[in-house]
Amino acid sequence: MPTRPMVALVALREAKFPPQSEVFARLRQDRPDLPPVGQADRQEGVCSFMIGRDTAAISLMDAPIPWADLEGPCASAWYWPEAAASLREHRAHVLVVVLSDSEDRVATALLLTSLVAAVASCSDAAGVCWVPAALVHSPEAFIASSQEMSKEYLPLYLWVNFAIQQHHDGSYCMSTAGLVEFGLMEIEVRSSYRDPEFLLDRVFNITHYLLDNGPVLEDGETIGLSDDEEIPVTHGPSMWDDRTTVIQLGL
């Protein structure tokens, strides 16, 4: 199976490579369950190394992340009101990559999250960009979530964009972005008069279920968080791009 990369970016206030030994020490502290870091090869601003069978790399890019790539994510980062102010003036960034031939993309994401948190902890970070979902996070929030995560409690808000909008008739639509990276279809609710918090709760929990179990929701079946709840599941064209098939929930 081909090696598949997963990528995140750490925005820096100055172009300074994070101390390699400190990053590895922080990684060992936060993830004692990981295999030891293999022999590191550093040259021309790039440090590559092995963690078990996975290859990882940290690259210092002596330029900011293009603002065109950050403006949209900053505008939609309701959970981090200071996103634009913090990221607009950053001067450089670190490209963090994990390459794995494993089919367990959740394990790859957990490893990348831990490595990004270690880099952010050991540098003057202005923010983190989770590339697969085009999400931005404050370094503090990203580090805190990484320290609380586990296989049983996945940091979905770091990995998946749960977007909700209100229609003119008062109903809400909701969609995810980032699940494709895990080999899953995105989830959408086209129109619902349910409370937004209820919609988020259901979509969040169904997302976690899919990441735990894989693409198990078939077209035409139902799912629920209790024995008496039956949420219809349909596979159909996305409301944003009819060439893409998504899981539509009847909420």
Image (tube, rainbow, N blue to C red):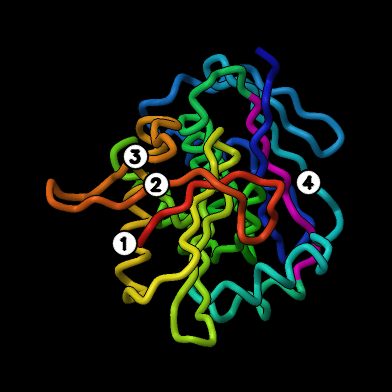
Q: Are discs 3 and 4 less than 8 Å apart at CB?
A: no
Q: Earlier in the sequence, mark 4 or mark 1?
A: 4
The magenta region covers 90-99
Q: Is residue 69 above or below residue 150?
A: below
Residue picked out by circle 4: 60
Q: Earlier in the sequence, mark 4 or mark 2?
A: 4
Q: Residue flagged by tag 4: what amino acid is it?
A: Leu
What whole-number distance in Å separates the C-alpha atoms at marks 1 and 3? 20 Å
**Residue 38, how many percent across, how many down?**
59, 18
Q: Are discs 4 and 2 less than 8 Å apart at CB?
A: no
Secondary structure beneath label 4: strand
Q: Earlier in the sequence, mark 2 or mark 3?
A: 3
Q: Are discs 4 and 1 less than 8 Å apart at CB?
A: no
Q: Earlier in the sequence, mark 2 or mark 1?
A: 1
Residue picked out by circle 2: 233
Q: Residue furthest left?
A: 227
Residue picked out by circle 3: 221
**Residue 183, how many percent across, how many down?**
56, 33
Nearer the viewer's eye, disc 2 or disc 1? Answer: 2
Residue at the (78%, 35%) spot, across then down: 46
